[in-house]
Image: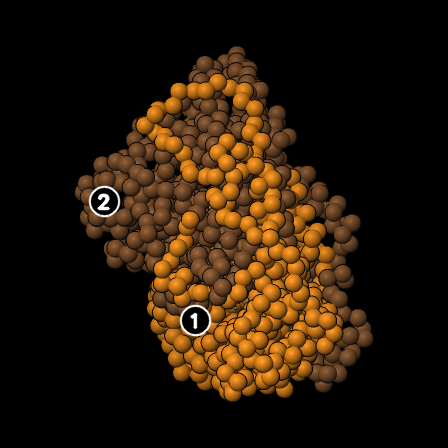
Chain colours: A brown, B orange
Amino acid sequence: MLYLPHTREDIASMLETIGVDDLDGLFSTVPEDCRFTGDLNLPEALTEWELNDHMKALSDSMATFPAYKVFMGAGSYEHFIPASVSYLLSRSEFVTSYTPYQPEMSQGTLQAIYEYQTLAARLMGVDVATASHYDGAAALAEALLMAARITKRRKVVISSLIHPLYRRVVQTYFEPTEYEVVQLPYLKSGTTDFAALDDMDDLAAVGIQSPNFFGCIEDLQAIGEKTHDKEALFIASFTEALAYGLLKNPGSQGADIVAGEGQSLGIPRSFGGPGLGMLGSRKKFMRSLPGRLVGLTKDLDGKRGFVLTLATREQHIRREKATSNICTNNSLCALAAAMYMASVGGTGIRELARLNYDKAEYLKAELKKAGCIISFDSPTFNEFVVEFPSGFEATHRRLLEKKIVAGLCLAPYYSELANHYLLCVTETITKEDMDTLVSCLRSCFQKSKQA
Amino acid sequence: MNESLGDTGLILNDPLLWEKGKKGRCGFSLPRRDVESAPLREDLIDEGPDFPDLSEVDVVRHYTRLAQWNFGVDTGMYPLGSCTMKYNPKINEKYASLPGLAGAHPLMPADLSQGALKMMFELEEYLTEITGMDATTLQPAAGAHGEFTGMLLIHAFHVRKGASRSKIIVPDTAHGTNPASAALCGYRPVAVSSNEDGILSADAVAEVMDEDTAGIMITNPNTLGLFEENSKEIAEIIHAKGGLVYCDGANMNAVMGVVKMGAIGVDVMQLNLHKTFSTPHGGGGPGSGPVCIKKHLEPFLPVPRVVRDNGTYVLAEDYPESIGKVQAFHGAFGVMIKAYSYIRRMGPKNLNKASQLAVLNANYIKERLKGTLHLPYDRPCMHECVFSDKHQAAQKIATMDMAKRLMDYGFHPPTVYFPLVVHGAIMVEPTETESKEDIDQFIDAFKAIVNEAKEDPDLLRDAPRSCKVRRLDETTAARKPCLAG
Ligand SMILES: Cc1ncc(COP(=O)(O)O)c(C=O)c1O
């Protein structure tokens, strides 16, 4: 086996040094009645050649871009990843190292994560960003728990337009705690109805996603002010980080904590993971943040260097009193995001985000012309909700046969929204793709009218 | 010894990203604009994020230089205890980036995602078999996340029985994530001490177990690298009072094909794919922390679950007692592919062999270094062994000094100052992928360092001298935090 370097002679001489007769003898401290003596019931080893075929078959069975035109985002976005990013990210000094516990030997990871923290903080508009979390949903759950700890209050309020699967994760995290999660309804405009906040007291936090699950841009400023009137913390969440290449960032609109998903920043979709949980806050709350932080310092000669810092918040020092249980995070994904943000640059990210916006607006306009209803009139970024004629399910299936994914059906998540679909357009979708979608829709509608 | 591994090399400085570049540069090929600009409400936007503008060459040089300041398993031996820094096979990386897998959308209909679902289904089966449990969820994103998921399952189990319990037993040797995960789930950890052999005694557990205790979190093999010999008896004590046994399976690399945790009383456990199953650690993640359970916890597993139905795979949501979700989608799929590929490449015999060789390497190091370093528990170890700096106290040399000096010799240091029960702990986990020659070189380096401690201790206090930077001022970093530039 090519990963196991020991020769028979090596094993014999090492066993002799140890003073046992055979490999089995190494397990003398495992009591007889704890031993498994059979063979594991697993498939026999494959050669690399054989496995190549097997893995290729698995991959080939999947419906993915570019063969499929996927007009579906909903928390997982197709964006171009520069070849240089994938290439640099495969440097094995980054890939095969552990969490940088020994800083002198890990300056590459440490400086890169410090740079990620900086760019992430600038993107979200906060003072401090952590080194990464598991995904946007877990980051949001941790942000809400953090707010409850800071305010010592028990109730958190979240918008029903936060990604439904994120809300599910929040519910799961909160279930065994003493805290309560309340949801805000939404308005006809496709944004959160926060009027109910007036009658709520003793709130730890209000959590709002923008652009929200319907793609609509929320009035963060207004909700933030209302939240602060209640002396609660304002938490902004997001699933599409690229939006902040164009839109005002949450921090500048009053968010105290920002938590979201950074998959759009150079990380492949990979069936939903690993992604990048992004989390940051105002400086004031820095010591309550969950997760790892890299800080700037100097070495004995006064040279610039970086270390993991503020460890007294963490599980390995504080154990059950830590701000979180997180240990391994998603460091390499943060590194991908840093490389991506550095490659796109300040000028580039704005242009790229604008292109996403413009393309989505184009499709919206074309769909309207084809007789579809754009359900909500609030401005959107690169996703929006369309109401199709009733019975659209069959059309959706027919389009799948043509390798077009015409958005995500919203009915399973919002039962009142039958025939409503969430569509997404990024820079990877061409005008031609959009025109094809619209003309297919037209001919489907035509046929169903005739039928 | 012969020529040491450690040497000097040409290391180039590189400033911070935003200290480089010029406005107007771009390292990204922007897609062609094929639609017109649409109206956009001015009040929604401002000037955009303050990112530097860099060319592709700027970016490539920057990260290439940074990479050279780092040390990985591919650079050399990385015997970081409790972290299982084994070799990460390159073919696994290739599979994870196959376009159909890396490009897959998690919400595509199941009939268009059969390859991904088949892989997940089979990986769950393999992990279930390796642990001897009844079912597995792949959703948790790392070891600690798996622990938390396990705690939620235990909580749901007790709630259904009509009595949620308030405490959980956690030994003093446990990793910090154990008490933190328990606390996140609302449990109060109750500490028990290990005995003079470094393991738990059944009596110590019996003394604290009661009807308000949800169960025990037990790491096996434990963080001293020792097998918990009384685990079966301990499980009986816990079960007799209605509790459940959680096993932190981060150290499974010692016992694949040797012990099935399901057969020794474990009800729920997590595996760290980024340890035992060869997926790279990425400088701190992403990992993957599947949770394996016994039948009685199955109704509570996170959703959706991958189910096989007449030869096709579907995502099933209809589990009313499920704890819900711990990740938005299916977990770290990209990491699962690598673990799957590893298991398929290894097969059952080599997995078992890997555990045997991991234990062989650790015991070999223990035997050869025990005269040189203090060995607090002189018993056969599993995949790792724990020394201390007791013998160096006379020279006022501490664990950290020896660790830093190892860098000059070209090795990543072991885990230091953990577990907490050993003062000045030096926790060495070589893994099975290190050859005898490399291990001998490591042992020789450690012996040379211990000699230096006697003859020229300043060499250690001054170490490292051959890294990009010398020892760093961590105190000021924490006192006056500067976390962004
Ligand atoms: C014994 C043990 N348990 C749990 C963990 C936590 O795993 P992770 O870092 O993947 O969250 C670790 C690793 O750090 C460990 O060594």
2 vs 1, front mark: 2
Pick out the residue farthest to the front: A301
Residue where numbered disc 2 is placed: A228
Residue at 36 percent across and 69 percent down: it is B188
Chain letter of the residue carrying label 2: A
Q: Is mark 1 within 8 Å of ligand 1?
A: no
On the rendered structure, is A374 left or right of B227?
Answer: left
On the rendered structure, is B324 left or right of A254?
Answer: right
Q: Is mark 2 within 8 Å of ligand 1?
A: no
**Residue A353, label in figure:** none
> Does the rendering let one see residue B460?
yes
Mark 2 crowd level (few <14, some 14–19, many ≥20, 10 Å Cα): some
Residue where numbered disc 1 is placed: B215
Q: Is residue A66 above or below residue B397?
A: above
Residue B389 position, x and y percent, is: 53, 81
Residue at 39 percent across and 63 percent down: it is B476
> Does the rendering let one see residue A263?
no
